[in-house]
Amino acid sequence: MQVPEHYTSDVLFFFDGKPLELSLYQLLSERMAEVLPDDVSVKVQKNQISFYAPRLFAAASLPVHRKKDWPRECLVVTIGLARPLNSPRAAVSVEPYPGRWTNHILVTRPEELDSELMEWLREAHDFALSKR
């Protein structure tokens, strides 16, 4: 995974005061680096950490508009796919453009960063490469 020069300090600043979410993100990043090609780059932004190949295909963020039934502490993993995720793990799925779905998954425990989630991220990576 290709990271910018100040990546580590930017990530620490992004998750300041959120140790659980930081640890979940670090594990997510490690697992993504293990299963995705080397063409993935990452960018820490104000509201999310974005993953590109070269187009945006996934992001990690903190909940901004928390729904009433969402956990108090969680990491939101957003995945762009050609389909909605038909899974109880998908907290929200929206179609901002025809044939392009944004799926939000709430992660609260390390074991939720599993092979199923990694497969969705691989699918999102491949979908991003197929777009013009």
Image: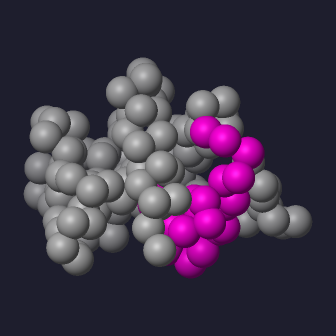
Residue 23 lies, in percent from the top left, at 58, 38
Magenta range is 36-61
- Kindly indicate the quadrant of the structure image that contains residue 119: top left
When the figure is inspected, residue 129 is found, relative to residue 126, above or below; the finding is below
Residue 26 appears in the figure: no
Residue at image location 46% in from the left, 33% down from the top: 118
In the image: residue 71, left or right of residue 36: left
- Kindly indicate the quadrant of the structure image that contains residue 27: top right
- Which residue occupies the foreground of this view, 89 or 57? 57
80 within the magenta span: no
In the image: residue 93, left or right of residue 48: left
Residue at image location 66% in from the left, 30% down from the top: 34
Residue 94 lies, in percent from the top left, at 17, 65
Q: How many marks?
A: 0
41 within the magenta span: yes
Residue at image location 66% in from the left, 41% down from the top: 37
Residue 42 lies, in percent from the top left, at 67, 60
In the image: residue 19, left or right of residue 8: left
- Which residue occupies the foreground of this view, 55 or 64? 55
- Which residue occupies the foreground of this view, 43 or 128? 128
What is the image's colouring? one colour
- Which residue occupies the extreme right position in the image? 5
In the image: residue 23, left or right of residue 74: right
- Kindly indicate the quadrant of the structure image that contains residue 115: top left
Residue 129 lies, in percent from the top left, at 52, 59
Residue 39 appears in the figure: yes
When the figure is inspected, residue 115 is found, relative to residue 36, above or below; the finding is above
Residue at image location 21% in from the left, 53% down from the top: 83
- Which residue occupies the foreground of this view, 56 or 131? 131
When the figure is inspected, residue 19 is found, relative to residue 14, above or below; the finding is above
